[in-house]
Image (cartoon, rainbow, N blue to C red):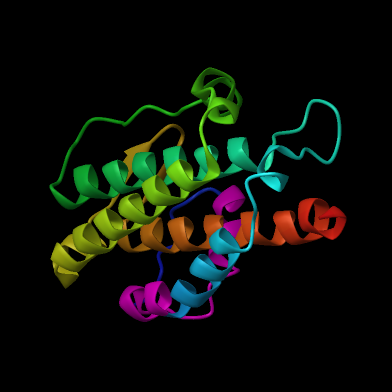
Amino acid sequence: METPAVYKNYFENYTSLVAEENLQQAFIAQKNAFNHFLDSITEEHSTFSYAPGKWSLKEMLQHMIDTERIFAYRALCIARQETATLPGFDENLYADKSFANKRTWVDLLQEMKIVRESTLLLFGSFNETMLCHTGHFSSASATPHTIGLIIIGHFYHHINIAKERYLTNA
């Protein structure tokens, strides 16, 4: 399936990190990186922030959870041919209001794994026609197929940031 160039160039930062074009293959390929990344971080290190004003690893993981939920919802709406433009979200406001640092790393891990399982089931329920519908959110347009690639690429993006800025100091 060809990925339509109907999304903002911003999202190409994520989709370019995904080697597979087939969503199921891409989700499967990410599974090991997903589990290794999540399980490699200790409770002690999960509150680490690499600079003042930057998110802790807990806040980053909560951001990943929130973002996956929001993008999965967008994919669902578009697959079901919603005609309204879906709202955007302010990732920094969401992070600030999440109180992620008050939660345990284990709790966040469990939530992330459940959210991902839900995402896999959702995308597994879409047929080829549904994956190709185009819908609108914020000031962008995309198909559920492209949104799936964005979800996968967003996770890779944050794994890369964690390796570069957080885990080097572990």
Is 14 on the left-hand or right-hand side of 110?
Answer: right
Q: Residue 34: image x %, image y %?
A: 51, 66
Q: With respect to residue 42, does 48 lie above or below? A: above
Asked if 162 appears above or below 62 in the picture, the reply is below
Q: Quadrant of the C terminus?
A: bottom right
Most common secondary structure along the magenta stretch:
helix
Q: Is residue 56 left or right of residue 138?
A: right
Write the start and end of the magenta stretch as one range.
9-28
Q: Quadrant of residue 57?
A: top right
| Picture residue at 38% right of the left edge, 45% below the top | 111
Is 14 placed left or right of 109 in the picture? Answer: right
Q: Position of residue 137 (x, y in %)?
A: 37, 36
Residue pictured at 78% horizontal, 57% vertical: 167
Q: Left or right? Give the position of 19 relative to 151.
A: right
Image quadrant occupied by the N terminus: bottom left
- What x and y, as percent, mark residue 86? 32, 31
Q: Is residue 2 above or below residue 110?
A: below
Marks counted in the figure total: 0
- In this picture, is 145 found above or below 50? below
Instruction: Report x, y in % for residue 138.
Output: 43, 32
Question: Is 62 included in the stretch rendered in magenta?
Answer: no
Q: What residue is at 53 percent from the left and 79 percent from the top?
A: 19
The quadrant in which residue 168 appears is bottom right
Q: Nearer the viewer, residue 14 or 27?
A: 27
The answer to which image quadrant residue 119 occupies is bottom left
Compare residues 66 and 102 and report the one nearer the observer: 102
Residue at 31% across, 48% down: 72
Q: In the image, is residue 11 part of the stretch drawn in magenta?
A: yes
